[in-house]
Amino acid sequence: NALSNRMLNCKKQLEVACSNLSCATHLILLLIRFKFGLDSKNAYLMEAFLSPIVADDTDAQGWEERTKAAMLHLLRSVLVKQSRGSKSTQFPQSQMTLMDDTSKLKSNIQQVCERLSKGYRLYRSTTNNKKKEFSTTPKASSPPSRPTERKA
């Protein structure tokens, strides 16, 4: 009975920790969106990579491991610093293992934010959609000219 009570207590603590992490991730996503002026499409994609959905499962792949893999993917693909001669990106094979320390995850998130601050975006429109400016006040114009009549 004592063991089951302890297990229930640990499960509640895990749920609270997951909820806190989810709330903090939502806040970070909002700060990133407003700090770097991300439009809705870029903010949506950022949320897909830095997911606020934190499951309380105890699989080998926790939120930290999935988020680290997503940040590395961003840094090596979409937000890659292109050198002049490079045309393709090589992706090294790596295994996801449980993290002992989250300092590398923090560093990866910082690198993504640095690239966003330099103007990199997750989504770039392929067309030049220039916003049309609409004025609510009519333009001042001269009245239409009338044809002059000739007297014979």
Image: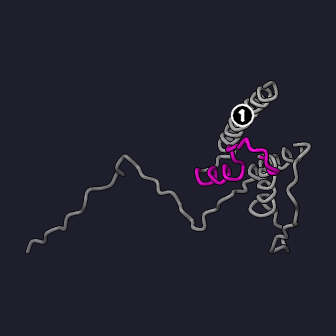
Give the position of the C terminus as an image quadrant.
Answer: bottom left
Q: In which quadrant of the rendered view does residue 100 lie?
A: top right
Q: Residue at x 82, y 51 (%)?
A: 60
Q: How many marks?
A: 1
Mark 1, other Cα within 10 Å: few <14 / some 14–19 / many ≥20: some
Q: Residue at x 87, y 49 (%)?
A: 98
Rendering coords of residue 103 (x, y %): 89, 43
Towards the viewer: 111 or 67: 67
Give the position of the N terminus as an image quadrant.
Answer: top right
User: What colour scheme was applied to this rendering of the protein?
Assistant: one colour
Q: Amino acid at mark 1?
A: Glu
Q: Is residue 38 magenta?
A: no
Element type where label 1 sits in the image: helix
Rendering coords of residue 129 (x, y %): 54, 62
Towards the viewer: 105 or 9: 9
Residue at the limit of the structure toward the left, as seen here: 152
Residue at the limit of the structure toward the front, as seen here: 1
The reply, left or right, for residue 103 in relation to residue 121 is: right
The reply, left or right, for residue 134 in relation to residue 119 is: left
Q: Which stretch is magenta?
A: 40-62
Q: Residue at x 30, y 56 (%)?
A: 142
Rendering coords of residue 97 (x, y %): 88, 53
Vertical comparison of 16 with 65: above or below: above
Rendering coords of residue 20 (x, y %): 72, 33
The residue that disc 1 covers is: 15
Q: Is residue 52 magenta?
A: yes
Q: Residue at x 65, y 40 (%)?
A: 30
Residue at the limit of the structure toward the right, as seen here: 100
Q: In which quadrant of the rendered view does residue 31 lie?
A: top right
